[in-house]
Image (cartoon, rainbow, N blue to C red):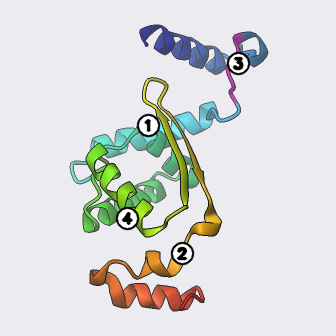
Amino acid sequence: MAAAARLVEAAVAAQQANLLQPDKVGLDTTMWITAVERAWALEVKHAVESNKELEPLSDMWYAHHAIIAQGNLDEALRRIQIMQTFRQEYKINHSVEQAHHYLSELIEQQPGFLLNLDVDLEQQISVNAFDVGCFNPTKALQTDPKNAGRRAADCKAIGVS
């Protein structure tokens, strides 16, 4: 695993120096962020880490918010605050136990929807397959009794009865 981390670090350094030749290194770089996007993401990360009211995120989420906001730090922080409020309101903690709980509920609620869930923790990749034709939005939107009124309005808004 340490060798893989060193390979990624070397590839990132080469990309930053604009020397990376994917065909020779053997890495797919199509989803890598640009140097400008990386600078935006680092700015967002430093701002979040220095703000005691905001919870730390993964580097992927810093990059996500930075790219969506196109370098506008205030906009990125506004979006991060909104998502933090959402996670707190719905008690989302990103634990393995919580993921297992909700996947189990999804499988029970939407039979046939989740076809495959394959996670490689060493490489930090996940391949998921879904049959969207098996997804029943009415069931999904009307499950939580606490939100029944809001969910019913959501159903009506998207034309689901």
Label 2, on which residue? 136
Res 113 quadrant in image = bottom right
Type of residue at label 4?
Ile
Q: Is 33 displayed left or right of 85 in the figure?
A: right
Q: Secondary structure at mark 4?
A: helix
Within-10-Å neighbours for mark 3: few <14, some 14–19, many 20+: few
Instruction: Please state which amino acid type lies under the numbered disc 3.
Output: Asn
Q: Return the residue at label 1.
A: 59
63 in relation to 92, above or below:
above
| Secondary element at image label 1 | helix
Q: Mark 1 or mark 2, which has the lower sequence index? A: 1
As helix, strand or loop, the secondary structure at mark 2 comes to loop
Residue type marked 1: Asp
**Label located before the other in sequence (2 or 4):** 4
Range of residues picked out in magenta: 25-29
**Mark 1 and 2 residues: CB-CB less than 8 Å, in contact?**
no
Which residue: 61% across, 35% down? 33
Residue 157 in magenta stretch: no
Q: Nearer the viewer, mark 1 or mark 2?
A: 2
| In the displayed structure image, the side of residue 141 where residue 13 appears, left or right | right
- Alpha-carbon distance for marks 3 and 2? 47 Å
Label 2 is placed on what type of residue? Asn
Residue 144: give x, y in percent of width and height: 32, 78
Q: Out of 96 and 88, give the one closest to the viewer.
A: 96
